[in-house]
Image: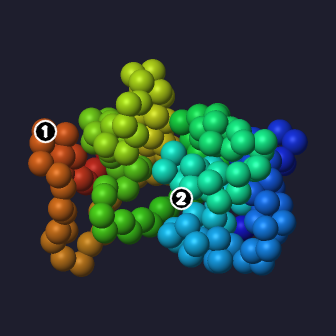
């Protein structure tokens, strides 16, 4: 997918351009070299440079340490702002959402967690709390509402709701707790909107 983010209006894209410039100025000809030096997967640097995903609070300080003059020393603070400015729907996911809304059929395979489109509010909340330590209540509510709002596609006249197609009994490995038990029961029923 081509990078259509505008660095004049997208902080993540601007930071990405600055990172790329710093990488090249430092003599690193590939993103792979920087990733290896920092101990990250190449995709972390690719996403940071394209603005698709501003670097996390673990990654940004290491990048800033490698390139001390990056953004006049403000890289870590600006990366935090870029992450927050994405809102509840990250920019890298926006294309998928528009296609999902137009689709007549969606096939998803996720072996680790329940796909976002099928998550209950409690399950989604538990995932967000686990992923984003210290998230405030308003931001959490926005994330959960955006996740659950995707299920409106099940209300389209041509939808037919959710219907699992499986060759054998699903082997769901969910964390313990009420949210996970409710989530498993909802998937097992396999029809209508997810509650």
Residue 66, percent from left and from top? 65, 59
Q: Is residue 167 above or below residue 1?
A: below
Asked if residue 116 can be seen in this view, the reply is yes
The residue that mark 1 highlights is 178
Question: Marks 1 and 2: in contact by CB < 8 Å?
Answer: no
Closer to viewer: mark 2 or mark 1: 1
Residue 3 position within the rendered picture, expressed as x and y whole percent measured from the top left: 78, 61
In the rendered view of the protein, which quadrant contains the N terminus?
Answer: bottom right
Figure coloring: rainbow
Q: Residue furthest right?
A: 8
Q: Nearer the viewer, residue 39 or 90?
A: 39
Vertical position of residue 69 compared to residue 179: above or below: below
- The reply to whether residue 155 is in sight is no
Q: Which residue is mark 2?
A: 104
**Residue 30 found in image quarter:** bottom right
Q: Label 2 to label 1, Cα distance in Å?
A: 32 Å
N-term-proximal mark, 2 vs 1:
2
Q: Is residue 117 above or below residue 104?
A: above
Q: Position of residue 116 (x, y in %)?
A: 40, 50
169 or 180, which lies in front? 180
From the viewer's perspective, tell me whether residue 42 is left or right of residue 108: right
- Which residue occupies 45% across, 40% down? 147
Q: Image check: 107 left or right of 70?
A: left
Q: Secondary structure at mark 1?
A: helix
- Checking the image for residue 64, the label placed there is none
Quadrant of the image containing the C terminus: top left
Residue depicted at 84% across the width and 66% down the height: 25
- Image coordinates for residue 121, horizontal then vertical, percent: 32, 35
For residue 167, side relative to residue 59 (left or right): left
Q: Tag 2, which secondary structure?
A: loop
């Amino acid at each position: 997918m081509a990078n259509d983010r505008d660095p004049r209006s997208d902080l993540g894209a601007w930071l990405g351009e600055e990172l790329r410039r710093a990488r090249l100025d430092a003599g690193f000809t590939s993103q792979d070299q920087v990733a290896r030096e920092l101990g990250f997967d190449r995709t972390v640097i690719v996403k940071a440079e394209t603005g698709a995903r501003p670097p996390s609070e673990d990654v940004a300080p290491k990048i800033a340490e490698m390139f001390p003059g990056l953004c006049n020393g403000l890289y870590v603070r600006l990366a935090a702002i870029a992450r927050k400015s994405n809102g509840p729907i990250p920019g890298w996911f926006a294309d998928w959402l528009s296609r999902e809304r137009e689709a007549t059929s969606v096939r998803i395979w996720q072996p680790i967690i329940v796909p976002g489109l099928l998550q209950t509010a409690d399950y989604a909340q538990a995932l967000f709390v686990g992923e984003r330590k210290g998230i405030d209540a308003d931001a959490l509510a926005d994330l959960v509402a955006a996740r659950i709002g995707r299920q409106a596609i099940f209300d389209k006249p041509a939808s037919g709701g959710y219907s699992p197609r499986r060759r054998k009994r699903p082997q769901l490995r969910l964390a313990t707790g009420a949210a996970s038990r409710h989530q498993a029961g909802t998937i097992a029923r396999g029809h209508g909107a997810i509650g």
